[in-house]
Image (cartoon, grey):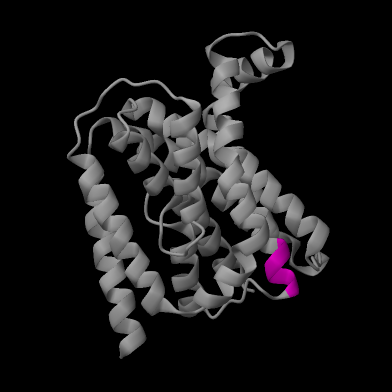
Amino acid sequence: MEIIKSFILGVVQGLTEFLPVSSSGHIEIFKEILGFSFESQNGLFFTLILHLATAISALLYFWDDVKNILKSTIKFKDDENFHFTLMIIISMIPAGLVGFFLEEKINQLFNGNLLLVGSMLIITSLLLLISDKIKSKNRKLSAKNSFLIGLAQALAILPGISRSGSTIATSIFMGINRNLAAKFSFLMVIPIIVGSSLKMILFDNLVYDGSILINYIIGFFAALISGYYACKWMIFFVKKSKLKYFALYCFIVGISSILYSIF
């Protein structure tokens, strides 16, 4: 795994984790382009590094919100921040169950299958395009809509379905304020990433190779920095109802992936 591959894959993971273009779909595409296997022993450890980097990037961007949420949660203070924590916990249920029991089986179906990935990217494109046309409302998060957003996040286990795109679009469909929809989408993924990382540590055969430490470091910081700015850019695009640009991008990449797989 060359240094340049580490950098590229780090940037791809960081940007696509939060921009609505499907990180898993793009990883499948770049695996083919770069000839890199995340299923190898070194690849699994590298995947862990990238996942943790993206989680940290969201924590850094929303640090003030995270601090307030943690304070209210620790004190069991009945306020908006504690309510936000409860909604995140509810949203984790579907994604946690699907990720733990079905992720490996689903990934086997999609591994290297750019035809399916391209098809899912087109579905993501349609979700983004429709959500962009809906007028923003100001409904609050509830247990019901948090669970439904969690289902959307669970659906994003399919490579090509954008996690941020599907969760934000679902929130907007249910009348949740765009700014709150984006913040909830980014913060709800942190415990999922941490849980997924723990699952890898406990159940996967991770191998740390000290001879390529520089590759790990470069991949980590590439994902960390790109993830931070992806959060910032995505908040702007959601608030300004500019998701149609990502819809067009997903459609073009989806069609290209389908054509590449056919020819």
Rendered position, 224 above or below 156? above
Frontmost residue, 21 versus 50: 21
Q: Residue at x 68, y 14 (%)?
A: 71
Counting from the top left corner in percent of width and height, residue 194 is at 68, 45
Q: Residue at x 34, y 63 (%)?
A: 121
Furthest toward the front, the residue is 144
Rendered position, 74 above or below 216? above
Counting from the top left corner in percent of width and height, residue 227 is at 50, 45
**Residue 5 shown left or right of residue 262 in the figure:** right
**Residue 133 shown left or right of residue 147 in the figure:** left
The image quadrant that residue 224 belongs to is top right
Frontmost residue, 121 versus 43: 121
Residue 215 visible = no
Quarter of the picture holding the C terminus:
bottom left
Magenta segment:
41-45
The image quadrant that residue 247 belongs to is bottom left
Q: Residue at x 50, y 74 (%)?
A: 110
Counting from the top left corner in percent of width and height, residue 243 is at 26, 44
